[in-house]
Amino acid sequence: MRRIVVLVFTWAVLLSAGLALAGCSSSDDEPAAVTPQPSPGVYTLKVRAGLGQAVTRGTFTVDDKTYVLKWSASDCVDVKKGDATVGTLKPETEGDASADLWGTLTGTFAAGDQLTLTYPKAEVSYTGQKGTLADIAANYAYATATVSVTDVSGTTVTAGDATFAPQQAIVKFTLKDELNAAINATAITIAGCGQEVTVAGASSATGEYYVAVPAVSSAHLTLTATASSGIYKYIRPNVTLTAGRHYEYSVRMGKKGEFTPSSTPLTLQAINAGTITFTKAIDGTVKYSKNGGSLTDYSSAIDVVVGDKVSFYGDNSTYYNSTGSGSSSKISCTAACYVYGNVMSLISSDGYSSAVSLSGEYAFNRLFEANTMLRSHPYKDLVLPATTLSARCYRNMFNGCTGLTRSAILADATGATYAYEYMYQGCKSLVEVTCYAEYNSAYFANWLTGVASSGTFYTTTEHKTDWETFCSANISGWTVVGK
């Protein structure tokens, strides 16, 4: 049903002027007809508005993860013509998904004008949320509609019906630390969605927070939470949030603290309970330490619970067996595990913190290949510090590790034939790469084929230009940063 908006304005001056001109004209010299031009005034507008299944306002319920809305008497709709606010509207009735919006406008209007309706506030901002549904319903459930003025007559402006479209999704975040305990955050920020999203003054003993987030497609989101126990971080790549929809994410966040990757042995930390296995292809000894305990010769799968840390040590130049058809050692886990620390603890069990040379060919070939349970720790880096490389030393090392979001930090190394070949091929969640080595096509063949469509590539300022050329040809959606 179409409703009209009535605007109060006096046309007496224009009418009198028109009559005076007509009285001064002769029949032999009749002036051309003049079309009255719109004049500024104060008007009233009524529009039939529908919410459908759009955003959260007033009273709402969740149905199939879509918010079902109802107009509230407190709703206030901003009206803009172009970039300027020209008035506000309020619903005449509440409790339904459709209502008549009524209010006054000030300005100049004519048939064909486009008016943009926005609620609950004139300017869209996602800062200062409280982490509750009630707060979102009252202050952050942005929806917009565009209507066209069809007629301006006397004190009446007539416009078409308005169908409001939501501008954001609602996400329920359940925040937990590495040991699966709830994080009672006092502040939350979300980066990567085009607008600043913040939750301030929040508190939840259960770690549950509702946040309005702008609709995004294939975005790389970084969530940071501040609590009395520290600062926590979580990264989620390739996120798509559809406006008007409801999502629930239970996120395990890493705590920022003192950590030196070069002096930390290669470590896997259990996110969920399971087993960690080191399948040896060589005769050399591999040892491990669980939760900082004594070193033990590896012999069979290691059982782990949430939070357990398993560090590996060895004194072998390569973990590839070149005899026969050749075979590679592999590290695998049956449940999600973080990986971080210095991979050189497998080369020099005592001196790994300063070890920077690889001599054995295929040294770490296929070491984590197809380990889909492997995850990048939010703060703790995996480092590959060798500056002298052997042929094919990192070949296929993380090929098919679809859970990784960040690469290992690769040193500015003297290359070797196919050293990085297929290294991160098929890592579809990878959105951040750090490589300080100079690009050479003979070393880096197909090493990032199949990664995320957009991301950030960190390198040295010296090598930035070469990597920009590589990225434009292979991962064109990525941004190269020199540092």
Image (cartoon, rainbow, N blue to C red):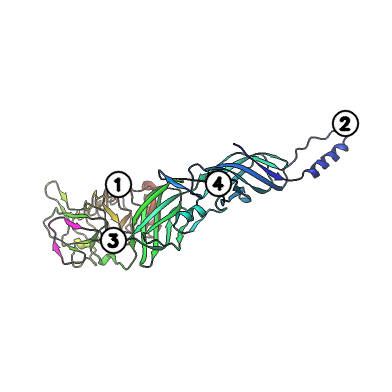
Q: How crowded is mark 3: few (under 14 residues within 10 Å), some or many (20 or more)?
A: some
Mark 3–mark 1 CB contact (< 8 Å):
no
> Which is nearer the eye, 264 or 388?
264
Tell me the residue at 55%/44% (across/down): 145
Q: Select label 4 or label 2 by which is in front.
A: 4
Q: Name the residue under label 2.
A: 28
Looking at the figure, which quarter contains the N terminus? top right
Q: Residue 383: x, y in percent?
A: 28, 61
In the drawing, does residue 346 fall left or right of residue 152?
Answer: left
Picture quadrant where residue 439 is located: bottom left
Q: Residue 64: x, y in percent?
A: 40, 43
Q: Which amino acid does label 4 sit on?
A: Glu
Say whether disc 2 or disc 3 marks the residue closer to the N-terminus: 2
> Which is nearer the eye, 234 or 160?
160
Q: Name the residue under label 1.
A: 426
The part of the chain drawn in magenta is 294-304
Q: What residue type is labelled 3?
A: Leu
Q: Name the residue under label 4.
A: 94
Q: Is mark 3 on a helix, strand or loop?
A: loop
Q: Select label 2 or label 3 by which is in front.
A: 3
Say whether disc 3 or disc 1 marks the residue closer to the N-terminus: 3
Mark 1–mark 4 CB contact (< 8 Å):
no
Looking at the figure, which quarter contains the C terminus? bottom left
Rounded to the nearest angstrom, the CA distance separating label 2 from label 1 is 86 Å
Task: Decide if residue 483 is in sight here.
Answer: no
Say whether disc 3 or disc 4 marks the residue closer to the N-terminus: 4
Q: Select label 3 or label 1 by which is in front.
A: 3
Q: Mark 3 points at which residue?
A: 179
